[in-house]
Structures are given as C-alpha cells and as structure tokens.
Amino acid sequence: MAGSALQALRTEPAFHHFTFIERSAERCKALSELVSRFPQIEDRVSVVKGDANVEIQRLCKEFRPGERAVVFLDPFGMNVEWATIEALARTHVVDLWLLFPLGIGVNRLLARSGKIPPGWRRRLDLLLGTKDWEQAFYRAQAESGLFEDEERLVKAKIEVISEYFLNRLRSVFIAVSPHPRTLMNSANCPLYLLCFAASNKNGANLALKIANDLLLRMD
C-alpha cells in the first residue's frame, strides 16, 4: 500500500506546502528520493530530520490566522507527547489525523497487577498529558476469600482506553470524530486507534463531516 507521504504527494489539487519529519537519516533520504519523483511540486516540499515533537511544536508557532493545515501523526510506538497535540490544537488552523498507540503501546504498558515501572509510567504521563489515567484504567473489585473479602485491581478494557483518549482530545480541540477506527493486526488484536480532530472553529463542521464519512466507510 502507498504510504502516507506518497498519498499526500499524489493529492490533487496539491497542497501549497509539504513538511515530512523523520528522525532517521536513512528514512529522510528515502523521503527525499520519493519527493524527486514529483518535480512539479518538489520546491514545495521540506524533509526535516529531527524529533517530531520538537519540530511540530516549532512549526505550530509559525502558522498564521487564515492558514489551514492537515497533520498526520504516525508515531513510532508512544513517542508523540501530549504537549505536541496541545500545540496543534492551539493553532486553530490544523485538522489532525492521529494513529494513537492503543494496543501496541498503552494497553501493553498497563500491567494487570497495576504495578507499572517508573519509566512506563512517565511515558504514559507524557502521552496522555495527565496523571489521572491510573484512576481511569484501574478499579478495585472486592472478591470473597477463604477467610475474608479481598480486593484486587481490574484493568480497563480497550474500549475504555479509547474513550478516555477521545475525551482528552475533546478537551483541547474544537471537534473530534466520534467514529475512530480501531486498526487490528492479522490476529485481530488492536494496534492503533485512528482519530480525527479539528481545531478551526469555522471549518470544524465541514471537516468533521468529511472525516466521519471516511472513517465510517473504512473496512
């Protein structure tokens, strides 16, 4: 399947400018080679080697009122930070498509015992932008023991994690699609949650209508 960069470059009518951000030097080279296949728009494309969190937050400061942008965040694991998502929302010009690491990241880090290593806990804090996820993802459940009632932690289901993150998006964006798609692997296990959010007040209704139509048509 054509990757997101190729899909963007093929779009007609073309975007006024394209920015591709990639940490890997090898992948930056591959992106530059891909761009060279589109000489008619090559001068409109920037390939930036760097941390997407840093580069996107920098770009957000350069947007001007009246401009519009589409951002597609396809993170490696859980590398996108909530600060980056907030920065995109504050622009009021961005429509965001985000692959949220639902099963491939968050669910894996939520140990059934509730005993989460400090490094994992910090990664969840950075991704979700808050520390209250623990109360949302775990609940105490009483069970009858041999001599007295015992209490154990019950981990939230995937659907709860999904709705929690959608509510986090709703807290900063003008509009968020209520129809995210859970992307599965060949074993039917959830990997990512494809989400859409709009930050422009004037264009949010139309953007949401288009996004909902696309999401609902996905197989």
Image: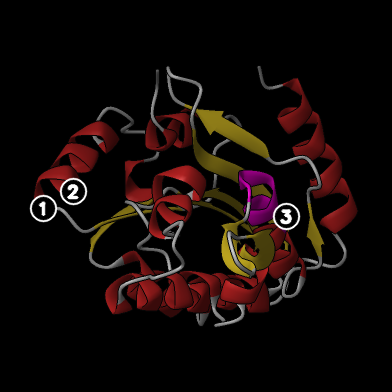
Magenta-span inclusion, residue 159: yes
Q: Secondary structure at mark 3?
A: helix
Label 1 environment density (alpha carbons within 10 Å; few <14, some 14–19, many ≥20): few
Give the magenta range. Answer: 157-163
Seen from the viewer's position, the closer of residues 142 and 85 is 142
Label 2 environment density (alpha carbons within 10 Å; few <14, some 14–19, many ≥20): some
Q: Which mark is residue 25?
A: 1
Instruction: Kindly tell me whether residue 130 is visible in this rendering.
Output: yes
Q: Quote the CA–CA distance across marks 2 and 3.
A: 34 Å
Q: Secondary structure at mark 1?
A: helix
Q: Residue at x 18, y 48 (%)?
A: 28
Q: Which residue is mark 2?
A: 28
In percent of width and height, residue 143 lies at 66, 59
Q: Quote the CA–CA distance across marks 1 and 2.
A: 5 Å
- Quadrant housing residue 175: bottom right
Are the residues flagged by discs 1 and 2 in contact, CB closer than 8 Å? Answer: yes
In percent of width and height, residue 1 lies at 40, 17
Magenta-span inclusion, residue 158: yes
In percent of width and height, residue 65 lies at 70, 76
Looking at the image, tell me whether mark 2 or mark 3 is earlier in sequence order: 2
Q: Which residue is mark 3?
A: 163
Q: Residue at x 66, y 17 (%)?
A: 219
Q: Nearer the viewer, mark 3 or mark 1?
A: 3
